[in-house]
Amino acid sequence: MTLTHPERSTTASAPTTTDGPGTERLTTLGAQLRTALDGDFAEDRARMRATFPAEDLLRDPELDVEASREWTLNRLLSLNGQGFGSAGVPTTANAGSDPRGAVLTFEMLSHGDLSVTIKSGVQFGLFGGAVTNLGTEWHHETFLPDITSMKLLGGFAMTELGHGSDVASLETTITYLPDSEEFEVHSPTPGATKAYIGNAAKDGTMAAVFGQLVVGGRSHGVHVVLVPLRDDDGNDLPGINTGDHGHKGGLLGVDNGTIRFDHVRVPRRMLLNRYGGVDESGTYVSPIDNQNRRFFTMLGTLVRGRVCVGGGGGIAARRGLSIATRHALRRRQFPAAGRPDGVLLLDYLVHQKRLLPRIARSYALGFAQNLLIEALVHVQGGDESTEEDQRSLETHAAGLKAVQTWFANESIQEAREACGGAGYMSENQLVEMRRDVDIFATFEGDNTVLMQLVTKSLLTDYRKEWGELDRTGVVQATARVAGESVLEATSAGIMLGRLADAVRRRPEETTLVDRRWHALMFEQRTRHSLESLAMRMRAAAKSKGDEFESFNALGDHVQFVARAYMEEWILSAFVDALETVEPGESRDVLERVCSLYALQSIHDTRAWFMEHNRISSGRSKAIGAQINELCRELRPHALPLVEGMGIPEGWLGAALLDD
C-alpha cells in the first residue's frame, strides 16, 4: 500500500510505517491505535490476524442458495482444520471450555464471509455449547470429539413458529416413558414446529431440542434433549419432518430450516441433564429445586452466544466503515478553489460527519466488548465467580449485543450510501454485508426484548424478584423495590462516577470536551430516567386499571432506560481503557475520539437533556459545533483510525479500493 499520497497523510508530516500481519503495512499511529483497541487481547488478536487463512475469504455473491451452502460448509471445514472453528469447545470431558478463544475466533471469522461465521456459531457455539454446558461427562465423551471435528453436524432447536423470545412457553414436549426408559419428543401443534434452525435444512444429523419435560404427568419446565435427525444418506429418520426455508434476506450459506417431531423416541441418556433429568428409578432429579431458577441457570450458560454475535456485529460495522473511509480518501468530487482536480470526499465536513462519529463509536464499542469478554472469561473460564457476576454478565451481554448489532445495521447502510452507486455494486461487499448482518438484530435474542431485560435487571435482582412474576407481579414488585437502593445498580464505573462528582455543582461552566462533564451528563440521563420509570411503575401499581396496559404503556420508557445505561457503561469502558494508553499521539487522538463518541451520544438525545433542564438551548447548539470541530481535528488521522480498527485492507475485498 502506497503511503505517499497527500490525501493519505496522517499529519502534516509524512507518516512512518510499520509491518503488520503478513504483508500489511500500517502507519505508526495506526499500529498504536490497533494495539490500544485490542487491549489485553492484542497479542492474541495479532497472532490470529497473522495466521488466519485469508485466501478464499469472501463468497462469490452470484452463487445461488445451493452453491452458497456448499461453499460455506467447505470453507468452514477448511478453517476448522486450520484451528479456526471449534476453538473454545472442549474435545474431551476433562478438557474444559475456553470462552476467550471461542469469542476471539468468532470475531476473527467475522472478518470474512458471515455465513461461515454463523454456521460456525451454530455448530460449535450453539450445538456444541449446549452439549458442553448442559450435558454431563457421558455426553462430552460421546459427542464432543465428533462435534469439534465436524463429523457430527447439529442444530440448536429452540425457536418455534409460535414462540420466539418466549422460551419458557415452548410447546414441544419431551415426555418420559418409564416402561422403555425413553423420552418421546413431540410437536403437538403447528406452532410447535421448530423454525429458522441453522443446519436443519440440509447438513445437520442431530439437534439439541428444547421442550417441556414431562415426567409422571408433571411438567418440570424447559429442558434440552439430543435428537438424531437424518440417516447416513441424508434422509429424515422416522417421525422427523424437516423443511427448508430456502432463499432468505441474507446468510445464503446457512441452511436454515424447520423441524417437526411425531412421537420420536430417544434413550433416556440423550437428555442433557446437568441441571435436571430422570434417574434410573424414573424419578425427576435436579440440583436446583426452583423451576424458574433452573430455567434461568440453563439459559445463562448460553450467554456466550450473545457475546459472540455482538462482537461479530461490531466487526462487520468496522468492515463497512473501513471500506467507506478508504474510498473517501481516494474519491474526488467537484473542483474547488485550489483543488482543480476535485475535492476528496473526506475533506467535505458533511462526509466526515457521516463516518468519523461512527468510527468513534466503533472504538467505544470495541473497548466495551473487551470488558465483556473479560467478564465472560471470569464467569465461565474457571475462576471463582458469584451469582451477582453471572447476572451482571447476562445484563451487559444482552445490552451490548443489541447496541452493537443495531449499530452494525445502521453503519453499513450509511457506509453503502457514502460510497454512492459503487456501494450498491455487489463486488464492493457492502450490499452483501448489509444483507447478512440484518438478522443479527434478531437472533440470539430480539434486540428490543434484550433491552427490556437490561432495564429489569437495573430495577431489581430479576432472578429473585422478576423471574417468578407475570406482568401484574412486575408492576407490584417494582413498587416495593424502587428507590435509592435500586439506583446503586446504575454505577457504570468508579472512575466515571468520580469524574461526574467533580463538576456536579457547576456543569455549565465546563468545556464541552471536559470528560467530567460527559460523565455527569451520562450519569444523569441514566439515573433520572430510571428513577422516573420506577415512580411511574409505583403509580401504575396503585391504580385499579388494566395492569397489563399499565405496564405496556411504559415500553418506550423501558427502552430509553436501557439505552441510557448502556451508553454510560460503554463510556466507562472507554475512559478506563484510556488510562492504560501511554501519553503521546495515540493517547491524544483517542481522547478526541472519546469526546466525539460522548458528544454525539448527548447530541442524539439532546431533546431529553433540554426537556429536563440539563443543558440550555445555547449549549445544545454548541455541541453540534464542537462535533464539527472534532471531525475536522480527526480528519488528518482518518487512515490510522481505520487501520486501528483492525481490518487489514487486503481482507476488505472491495473492488473500488483496487489501485
Image: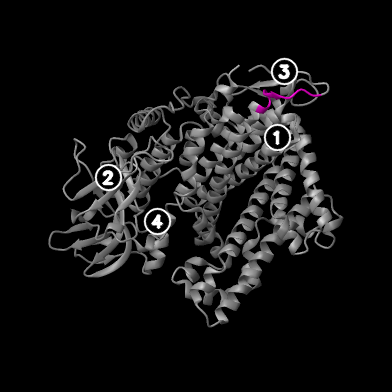
Q: Position of residue 266 (x, y in %)?
A: 19, 53
Residue 270 lies, in percent from the top left, at: 24, 52
Residue 5 is labelled as 3
What SS does tag 2 mark?
A: strand
Membership of 252 in magenta stretch: no
CB atoms at circles 1 and 2 under 8 Å apart? no
User: Are circles 4 and 2 on residues that touch, CB within 8 Å?
Assistant: no
Tag 4 near tag 1, CB within 8 Å: no
Q: Nearer the viewer, mark 1 or mark 3?
A: 1
Query: What is the C-alpha distance between the residues marked 1 and 3?
Result: 20 Å
Dividing the picture into quarters, in which one does residue 30 lie?
top right
- Please name the residue that numbered disc 4 is placed on: 164
Asked if residue 331 is among those painted magenta in the image, a careful observer would answer: yes
Whether residue 583 is visible: no
Which x, y percent locates residue 81?
37, 28
Circle 4 Cα neighbour tier, 10 Å, few/some/many (<14 / 14–19 / ≥20): some
User: Which contiguous range is marked in magenta?
Assistant: 328-336
- For the residues marked 3 and 4, what is the alpha-carbon distance in whole angstroms? 52 Å
Q: Earlier in the sequence, mark 1 or mark 3?
A: 3
Label disc, if present, on residue 351 of the rendered structure: 1
| Type of the residue with mark 1 | His
Give the residue type at disc 4.
Gly
* Quarter in which the N terminus is drawn: top right
Q: Which mark is residue 243?
A: 2
Nearest to N terminus: mark 1 or mark 2: 2
Secondary element type, mark 1: helix
Does residue 245 appear to the left or right of 228 in the view shown? right
